[in-house]
Image (cartoon, coloured by chain):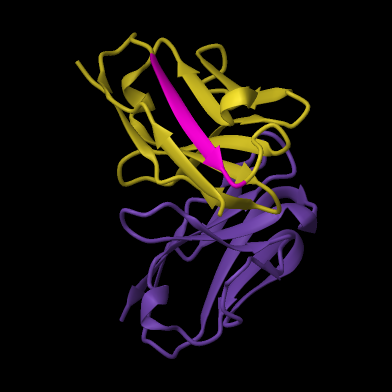
Amino acid sequence: EVVLTQSPGTLSLSPGERATLSCRASQIISVSYLAWYQQKPGQAPRLLIYGASSRATGIPDRFSGSGSGTDFTLTISSLEPEDFAVYFCQQYGTSPGTFGPGTQVDIK
Amino acid sequence: EVQLVESGGDLIQPGGSLRLSCVASGFSVTSNYMNWVRQAPGKGLQWVSIIYSDGSTYYADSVKGRFTIYRDNSKNTLFLQMNSLRVEDTAVYYCARLLGGLDYWGQGTLVTVSS
């Protein structure tokens, strides 16, 4: 099973600041199969990024993904008030698909 | 419009059984990779099971032998049959389509296993 580790656990930032979230895998993942999700309280997760760097439909361009091999990054270029949420990475190239534990982005 | 609507969650005693349903609209469950993902209260996401378009299935080790994923093509519905339920199966269960990531999710249905 591919284990995903996310850092930091919590990120406290102000609106307008840049957020950089990390996802590290225990083994090499094909870039085609790495995704990022946003989840707000009481809601289902929302797909932001798939294939490591492709934005899902309707996702603003302030969200971007990068990385390869075992190290991947989600960047939010300038935080909007609605971006404060929990972010999960996921690999879906190998069954079982696995999720990282999440990064909480809080308002500072 | 693509939509997924789950139902079937309930309070159930340990050892009991429950069947979750996920009705899809706007696409065919048969032609897609369909998943169940769960989230225990206050915890992260855990992938539970997947059924591929060819009918093959995979399960997380924690549910293997107890849960069964299947679909009804005529009703365009995905199911999760859960047997021998344990306290640790308590979670919100989501169905989701896998198409370049899990691109569509249902609203979730709560399963509580408790005596």
Could you tell me residue B56's position as x and y percent? 73, 23
Quarter of the picture holding the N terminus of chain B: bottom right
Characterize the magenta stretch by its predominant secondary structure: strand
- Is residue A105 rendered to the left or right of residue B115? right
In the foreground, B79 or B102 = B79
Instruction: Please give the name of the residue rendered at 40% of the width and 10% of the height, measured from the top-left corner.
Output: B84
- Is residue B45 rendered to the left or right of residue B8? right
Quarter of the picture holding the C terminus of chain B: top left
Name the outermost residue toward the left.
B115
Instruction: Please give the name of the residue rendered at 36% of the width and 36% of the height, measured from the top-left corner.
Output: B109
Name the outermost residue toward the bottom.
A16
Instruction: Please give the name of the residue rendered at 56% of the width and 11% of the height, measured from the top-left corner.
Output: B65
- In the depicted structure, whether residue A28 falls above or below residue B85: below
- In the depicted structure, whether residue B17 falls above or below residue A83: above
In reply to whether residue B9 is colored magenta, the answer given is: no
| Shade representing chain B | yellow
From where the camera sits, is residue A17 visible? yes
In reply to whether residue B25 is colored magenta, the answer given is: yes
- Is residue A82 rendered to the left or right of residue A68? left
Instruction: Please give the name of the residue rendered at 25% of the width and 14% of the height, measured from the top-left corner.
Output: B13
The magenta span reads B18-26
From where the camera sits, is residue B72 visible? no
Residue B28: image quadrant is top right
In the foreground, A59 or A86 = A59
- Is residue B70 rendered to the left or right of residue A7? right
- In the depicted structure, whether residue B113 falls above or below residue A25: above
Q: Chain coloured purple: which letter?
A: A
Could you tell me residue B60's position as x and y percent? 58, 27
